[in-house]
Image: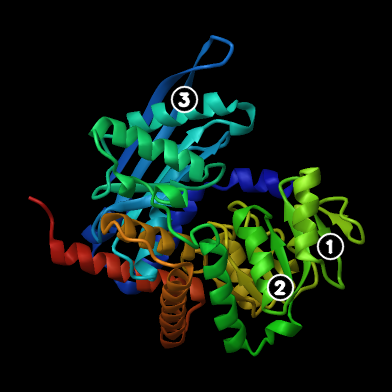
Amino acid sequence: MTTEHAAAQINAWEVAQRQFDLAAERLKLDEGMRLVLREPRREFTVHFPVHMDDGSVQVFTGYRVQHNLGRGPAKGGIRYHQDVSLDEVKALAMWMTWKCAVVGIPYGGGKGGVIVDPKKLSQKELEGLTRRFFTEIEILVGPEKDIPAPDVNTNAQIMAWMMDTFSMHAGYTVPGVVTGKPISLGGSEGRNEATARGTVFCVIEAAHHLGIEIPKARVAIQGFGNAGAIAARLIAEEGATVVAVSDSSGGIHAPDGLEVARVVAWKQEHGTVQGFPGAADITNAELLEVDCDILIPAALENQITAANAGNVKARLVAEAANGPTTPEADEILHRNGTFMIPDILCNAGGVTVSYFEWVQDLNRDHWTEETVNDKLRVIMVKAFGETLEMAHREQVDMRTAAYLLAVKRVADAMELRGLYP
């Protein structure tokens, strides 16, 4: 069974619920509270028509899920992908709840998706789909209710269309309805690099804890999109050697190191990292097993499984992607002494700077990139320290520690608010 096929067999929602159950059990959460937090508060499915360039009409299916609103409005990306499912969106919404709680920002978790391969759409079709989808979910969203953001295959332009659609219906400009917008429309400096920068802040803290010297470290990165490519650049700037990277079509490996800027240029020119001069082509599955000190999965979920976890050679795994490691793989890695920075902590830089963007929009303010990065560092370093302290105190791995921290914060907020009516 290929890694891709194995990943397709694993239900992300079941994984998310199992991770929650483990934390709830350990926290001895009240049975009623468990039932509340185990399920999303709202699941919204829409089927909407779009005029295609050839004159035909196609109907697309989209979702918006709000998992929990106990600590504030829902926050979470919208992805455009042919494999989007309601279960995947529910899992991602739940992970967003924990992610916001781990880093202490006042949001609950939300997520959205449309079943579509956007690469097959023209720019005009993409805009039509975006505006119609946002109109359909508009009863749920708003700067005080639910604030979407970019995710897989969505970007600043798509956020601009969403913001404009909402604003046209409101009759005035509402920049705070989405984050990840272009700077000229109220976007934040540093937003594009935020997920990768937060990951690298965590890697630096973890390396310090483990006694790994970053300038001597060899790094492998699965996924060369926004998070992966920028993480490669930032970790190389810290002095580390990037020995392997991959994108959706495959990867490359050079034990003596890759020049990240040249790989980025190669991918822009050829549409893939493969074939890069001086490096050997490898598969995405092989990348996870290359000889390295730090492994950064920055692609899709369910990449490190029970089938390959035993072959991971890295001492430190930093999850820039959401849910790249299954619970069975977690146990294997923990047993083998691999230190894991879990996704809900590691890639929370993106939602943290989204929060900064929202605050700037609500205040009609604009911060410098230096201010944004400084504030991000403070939040990520604090969250990493609190998670590590919890791991030591409870004698658990970092993922369990992050969940204990997050679930307790959300449960406390729900407890204080009580059940309405």
Residue designated by label 2: 236
In the picture of the structure, the residue carrying the numbered disc 1 is 253
Residue 118 spot, x, y in % from top left: 58, 32
The kind of residue on which mark 1 rests is: His
Q: Is residue 116 visible?
A: yes
Vertical order, 169 against 392 (above or below) = above
Q: Earlier in the sequence, mark 2 or mark 1?
A: 2
Q: Nearer the viewer, residue 227 or 166?
A: 166
Could you say where residue 166 lies in the image, as x and y percent from the top left? 31, 35
Lateral position of residue 160 relative to residue 221, left or right: left
Q: Choose the circle earlier in sequence order: 2 or 3.
A: 3
For the residues labelled 2 and 3, say whether their Cβ atoms are less than 8 Å apart.
no
Per the model, the C-alpha gap separating discs 3 and 1 is 41 Å
Q: Nearer the viewer, mark 3 or mark 1?
A: 3
Numbered disc 2: secondary structure = helix
Name the residue at 49% across, 45% down. Answer: 156
- Residue 376's place in the image compared with 84, above or below, is below
What is the distance, in whole Å, between disc 2 and disc 3 at their CAs? 40 Å
Mark 3 secondary-structure assignment: helix
